[in-house]
Image (cartoon, rainbow, N blue to C red):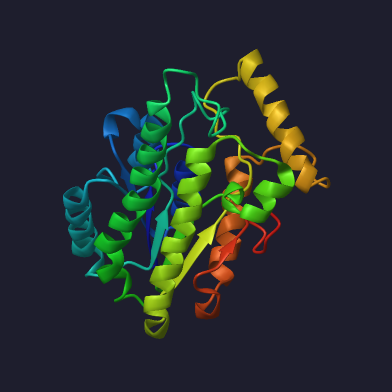
Amino acid sequence: MPSYLITGASRGIGLEFTRQLSSKVDNQVFALIRNKGTASELVELSSHTPNVRILQADVVDYKALKTAAAEVANVTGGTLDYLINNAAYIDRERQGLTLDGYPEGQEALLGDDIHKSIQVNVIGVIHTINAFLPLVSKSSIKKVITISSGVADPEYTLAAGFATAAPYSISKAALNLAIVKYAAKYQEEGIVFLSISPGIVNTAQKPPTPEEVEGFKKIVAMLKKAAPHWDGQPLTPEQSVKMVLDVVNSVTIKDSGAFVSHFGDKQWL
């Protein structure tokens, strides 16, 4: 009975991971979220899906993560086959700004945005891995999967001229190296660490405003500079997660430490 733990499982890609993985009745799926009170879709899913168990912990709270790991261990007998680090932070309000584009008098917000992005997207993932790694190490599968982003690729960023969303991109680039550090240490133990981009995914929970539509058109135009073959259409969570899981199921220890796309290579779109 394979076991999976997904962070950030209350919505979007995390919820879709939970939905697809729990559709196989032999899977044990642990959905880790910050607040059960704001996860109505996940709660509804778990109410009629016996192999989904909801856990509450913030990824920046190591004590809470250790408690969650103990809960998983009690159910699985002390192991965890797959850890999927999906929880992440991006500032939607200021993601259109460049590093030198913060308004005069609000420069301190730049440091705040970078700090929070690093705190959640890097340190939070490290805390999560450290809390669950003892369980993963006792598995026969031993896979730690971390959701990254193509905008963390320096070559692609330069080719696209993608200068905005800098705190998020910087944090994801740092995260990729953190995953390599784990891969370097645990290669001989057979633990597979992988950073993977899910592509551009439409996770919106409501129709976009006219301003959001125009903003997305500008992003598409930039990204297509480096990916002219792309049709500009985002993936659905269902499409993205299916492709990511296909890659996850195919990787082996020889791939540990890699940073790949949902195609399993460096094609980000």
Can see residue 30?
A: no
**Nearer to the camera, 113 or 76:** 113
Can I make out residue 187 in this image? yes
In which quadrant of the rendered view does residue 220 lie? top right
Rendered view: 204 above or below 32: above
Q: Toward the viewer: 124 or 79?
A: 124
Instruction: Answer with left or right where residue 55 lies relative to residue 251.
Output: left
In the foreground, 70 or 114: 114
Q: Image point 33% across, 28% down: which residue?
A: 38
Compared with 49, 135 (above or below) is below
State how many labels appear.
Answer: 0
The residue most toward the top is 210
Residue 143 coordinates in the image, percent (x, y): 43, 69
Instruction: Find residue 187 and report its horizontal and vertical position in percent.
Output: 42, 80
Q: Position of residue 141 (x, y in %)?
A: 41, 75
Name which residue lies at 58% across and 28% down.
Answer: 96
Which residue sits furthest right?
229
Q: Quadrant of residue 265?
A: bottom right
Above or below residue 103? Residue 236 is below
The N terminus, quarter of image: bottom left
Q: 14 or 129, which lies in front?
A: 129
Residue 170: image location, x then y, percent: 49, 47
- Which residue corresponds to the image point at 49% horizontal and 65% vertical from the top-left? 194
